[in-house]
Amino acid sequence: MDSEDINNCKNNIVNEIENIIEYVKNFEVHSVKDEKALDELYDIVSNMTKRVNEIEEAHRRRIELTNELMRTLGELENSHKKFAEKFSKNE
């Protein structure tokens, strides 16, 4: 369950994105400068999307590595138990 701070952060991100969407939908192009401004907004959003994809890939990889670490630790623990059982039987 997310903390209040995390939920606030998520809501703030969603609100900012919704504001950008609304702005772009209502944006009227009257000049070349307006076209360039729209292109600039597109570049910004495109870069954000690329960065979000990078963050998501890193997040996915961290989860994979954590799961792999947990499996390895579980296997190591089982190996130690088997060794301890074998060692105690030999005494």
Image (tube, grey):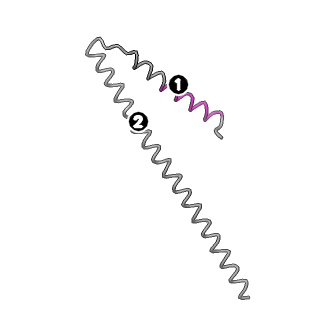
At 45% from the left edge and 19% from the top edge, which residue is drawn? 22
At 64% from the left edge and 38% from the top edge, which residue is drawn? 2
| In the image, farthest residue toward the bottom | 90
The numbered disc on residue 32 is none
Q: What stretch is highlighted in magenta?
A: 4-17
Disc 1 marks which amino acid? Asn
From the image, tell me which residue sits under label 1.
Answer: 15
Check if residue 28 falls in the magenta segment. Answer: no
Vertical side of 55 occupied by 83: above or below: below
C-beta proximity under 8 Å, tags 2 and 1:
no
Q: Where is residue 87 in the image (x, y as percent from the top left)?
A: 69, 83
Q: Position of residue 71 (x, y in %)?
A: 58, 63
Disc 2 marks which amino acid? Thr
**Where the N terminus falls, by quadrant?**
top right
From the image, tell me which residue sits under label 2.
Answer: 49
Q: Where is residue 23 in the image (x, y as percent from the top left)?
A: 42, 18
SS for dot 1: helix
Q: Residues within 10 Å of mark 2 (few under 14, many from 20)?
A: few
Real-space Cα separation, disc 2 to disc 1, in angstroms: 16 Å
Q: In this view, does 57 lie to the left or right of 35?
A: right
The image quadrant that residue 45 belongs to is top left
- The secondary structure that most of the magenta stretch takes on is helix
**Where the C terminus falls, by quadrant?**
bottom right
